[in-house]
Image (cartoon, rainbow, N blue to C red):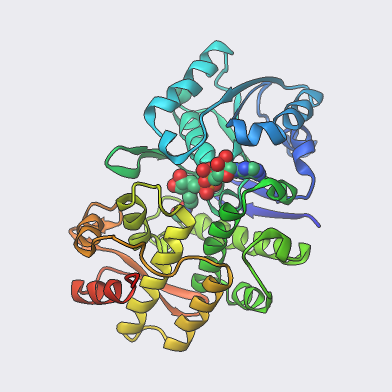
Amino acid sequence: MQSVIPVNLPRHAYDITIAPGSVDQLGVWMQGTTKRPLKLGSRVLVISNPAVFEHYGRRVIASLEQAGFTVATCLLPDGEHYKTLETLTKIYDAALANRLERSSTFVALGGGVIGDMTGFAAATWLRGVNVVQVPTSLLAMVDAAIGGKTGVNHPNGKNLIGAFHQPRLVLIDPHVLQTLPVREFRAAIAEVIKYGVIWDADLFTQLEAAPQLDQLSHLSAELLQAMLTHSCRAKAHVVSKDEKEAGLRAILNYGHTIGHAVESLTGYQVVNHGEAVAIGMVAAAEIAVALQLWRPADAQRQLTLLQNAQLPTHLPSGINLDAILSSLQSDKKVEAGQVRFVLPTQIGAAIVTDQVPTTIIRQVLQQMQTV
Ligand code: NAD
Ligand code: GLY
C-alpha cells in the first residue's frame, strides 16, 4: 500500500509519500525520478535525537550513502523544552563543520520537535537550504511535517520564533510507528480526529467504526493507512489553498486555542501537545454548542471518539481559569485583541470566529474542570 499526495503550491510543490518500509529507501526517494529529479545536492545533514536515531539512524544513513549522498549527522537532545534558539546552534555548527552548501539538504528524522527545528534551521542556514521531512511520530506524519511551518519556542510562548519553509519531500514510513511510545501515538490521534471534525466526514465515520483507537496494535493496517492518507490529504489541501495562513489554514488550529494555553500553563510537563489539543477540541465543541453552531449530538460523537482513544477530555487538576483566559490573550491567534476560535458547524466543516463572549469561554471551562 503506497500513497503519493501532492502538495500543490505554485512555487514550492512537493509530494507526501506514504510507503511502508520506505525508511530504507530514503536515498532513492531523495533522488527523485529521471523525469523529475529532486536535485537535493550531494551533501546531507541528518538531524535527529538519540531516541529515534538509535532505531532508524543507521538504516537511513546506509540508504542515503548507497544512493551516493555524503552524509553527516547532528543529534539534538530529546524533548519540547529543547526546542529553543540555543539548541538550533548545534545544527548550524554541524552544518558549518560539514560544509553544507546552498544546494545541500537537511533531513529531519524524528517527531515534530525535530521537524520544526530542522525546518527552521534549513530556512535560515545560508538564507535557505533544502529540507526533507522524515516524520517518525504520528503527530509529525499527519501534521507537523507538512505545510512548512517551522520554528522554535520563546521562553514566554510556543513557536513564537519561526518561518515558513516548505520541505522538498515528506516521506512517511508507517512501520516506524511500532517503536513510538503509546502515549505519543494516542496523543496524535487527537489531530486525526481533528481532521475528521473540521474537514473529512468520511475519515470521521471510519474512526467511529474502529473498536479502539488508543494504540497502534488495536488498528488494522488498512485503517492506519486510511488515517494517514486522509489526514495528509486534508492538510495538503488546506495548505495548498492558503500557504501562509491568511484565511482557510487557520481551521487547522481547531482545539489549539485552549490547547496551547493548557500546554503552556502546565509547563509542557503535564499534558503533551496532542492531549492538550484533545482538551481544546472538547472546549471548542462545547463553545460551538453553546453558540448553537453545532448539534450537541455531534459534539457527543466527537467526545466518544476522544474517549475511545483514551485522550483527556477535562482540564488538568489545579489549573486556574483566569490564568487560561489571560493566556489566551498572548496567543498567536489573537487578532486586534479578539481571541480566535475554530468552531465546528457539522462533522467535516468548521468556521473561524473571534466572536466568542468571554462569559461562554469561562462557563465551558468551568464545566471542564476536574472534580
Ligand atoms: P516529539 O517530536 O517530542 O516526539 C515525541 C516523542 O516521541 C519524543 O520523545 C521522540 O523522540 C519520540 N519519537 C518520535 N518518533 C519515534 C519513533 N518512531 N520511535 C520511538 N520514539 C519516537 O513530539 P511530536 O508530538 O512528534 O511533535 C510535537 C511538536 O510538533 C511540538 O513542538 C509542536 O509545536 C510541533 N507541531 C508543529 C506543527 C507544524 O505545522 N509545524 C504542527 C503540529 C505540531
Ligand atoms: N498545525 C497547524 C498548521 O500547520 O497550520
Q: Nearer the viewer, residue 332 or 114?
A: 114
Whether 119 is drawn above or below 253: the answer is: above
Q: Quadrant of the N terminus?
A: bottom right
> Residue at image x 52%, y 61%?
191
Give the vertical position of 70 relative to 233 (above or below): above
Q: Is residue 232 visible?
A: yes
Residue 81 percent location from the top left of the image:
41, 37
- Specify whether 246 is left or right of 76: left
User: Which of 58/100 is in front?
Assistant: 58
Horizontally, is 290 left or right of 301 in the view? Answer: left
Q: Which one is nearer the viewer's eye here, 251 or 21?
A: 21
How far across and down, in percent of the image, does residue 369 sit?
32, 70
Q: Residue at x 55, y 71 (%)?
A: 196
Q: Position of residue 3 (x, y in %)?
A: 74, 56
Query: Which residue lies most toward the front here?
Result: 371
Residue at the image point whose x is 52% and y is 28% from the top: 76
Quadrant containing the C terminus in the rendered view: bottom left
In this picture, residue 182 sits left or right of residue 316:
right
